[in-house]
Amino acid sequence: MEEKNSFLKEKIDLKSPNKNIVPISTSIGEDGKLSIGGCSIEELVKKYDSPLYILDEITLRNSCRAYKQALEKYYPGESLPIYASKANSSLFMSKLVSSEGLGLDAVSEGELLTALKGGVPNEKIVFHGNNKSDKEIEFAVRNNINVIVDNDYDLDRLEKLSNLSNNELEIMIRFTPGIECHTHEYIKTGSFDSKFGFGIEYLETLFSRINKTKHLKLKGLHAHIGSQIFELDPHKDLGEIMVKVILEAKKYGHNIDKLNVGGGLGIKYTENDDPPSIDEWVRTISTSVTKACKKHNLDLPILMCEPGRSIVSTAGITIYKIGAFKKIPGIRTYLSVDGGMSDNPRPITYQSNYSACLVGNPLNINSKNKYTIAGKHCESGDVLFKEIELSDCKTGDLICVFGTGAYNISMSSNYNRIPRPAALLVCDGEAEIIQKRESPSDLLKYDVLPDRFIKQS
């Protein structure tokens, strides 16, 4: 019997889950079927239906601890890893990262409220965004949350709020360091041409302006150079650039004591991916900042970083049920599943690639068929896999897609009025709901018929 899907046979990296395709607790039972967290996936689908998001608690906690331990190991000063909650925002994720000592970053009042209700201390929350509303800024200030200033519009309103309250307000600023990474053009956020942050060429003017405000105190810098990054050299450069900006700020009377280097470390979605480990990434940025501070005779600032994908992505899988088959002779065979772009918009949006297997035959024993796995939505581009090799399968069989913990739940939609899936947490043979499955009637909750239409009926 020929076995494929070698990633299911690879040794699991416990210290750096981003280098695995599968969650740490993945196993194949004596019956040859897939389990996660000690739970049979087939049994979970029988109880909770499909599509189904599943998160592995062990993988999540190991990822959080890898960042904390690496920072403690390599950075001599104070540090704080901050979870980028846009990857997967929920009460559960807020509670889990907080329990592991991480902070959290948010980009909306909804994410801020979720973090606070989930138990993240307000002093460990940072508020990002390139177009924050007045209401959102006021919410952050009222709750003593660190605001990262992205532009002059932010600065104007924060200055006004601090003057109205006659209270000192500490701020951080985001700037674009001009570092390019080999990543998708839609997720480059650190180049000179970016919607995020102040241009590096504008900083002297900015430092002068902040110095003239009555109550704003510039205490931190933030820069982020991209997403799904496999290169370490750009982060070597970033530390030196940010320390030089600290020196420039000092000329205008600003004492920067916080450096936030963003996130962006990649994960292993497919067997061709080879990201650095969390340990390597943290060592690179810690060494860069430490050397630059020593070179310029500066005290070490509090070092912050913002991992998102590398915390939660590998911990997540999505389970689909196979429905229709369509064979086009000489071209391809379509295999349709009960989800698609509404629960995972990344393939159609970013042409993202994933790894997958049959739950009932995860090692693809005697595989001989190639399928295009299509979603159920009314879009020709709703395709999860353009060609994937699977053994014989039939309607009703289950497919497991790996690496879906990040940007699946958080980017999901109700396109075609399809309800969002349920999400489960698994650990030690137990499964708990962390997000209820929506029903079609849930989608009508916010629809309103104008009175004249009601009268006509």
Image (cartoon, rainbow, N blue to C red):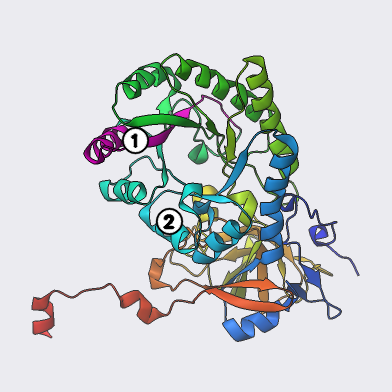
Q: Assess whether residue 51 is covered by the magenta stretch.
A: no
Locate residue 87, reporting x and y percent.
Answer: 53, 53
User: Residue 373 falls in which quadrant of the image?
Assistant: bottom right
Q: Residues within 10 Å of mark 1 (few under 14, many from 20)?
A: some
Task: First in sequence, mark 1 or 2: give its number.
Answer: 2
Amino acid type indicated by mark 2: Glu
Tell how many labels. Answer: 2
Q: Quick one: quadrant of the C terminus? A: bottom left
Between 319 and 86, the one nearer to me in the picture: 86
Residue at left offset 61%, top offset 85%: 47
Residue at left offset 67%, top offset 26%: 290
Side of 396 relative to 4 (left or right): left
Instruction: Classify 307 as above or below 449.
Output: above
Q: Mark 2 points at which residue?
A: 111
Q: Name the residue under label 1.
A: 168
Between 122 and 67, the one nearer to me in the picture: 122
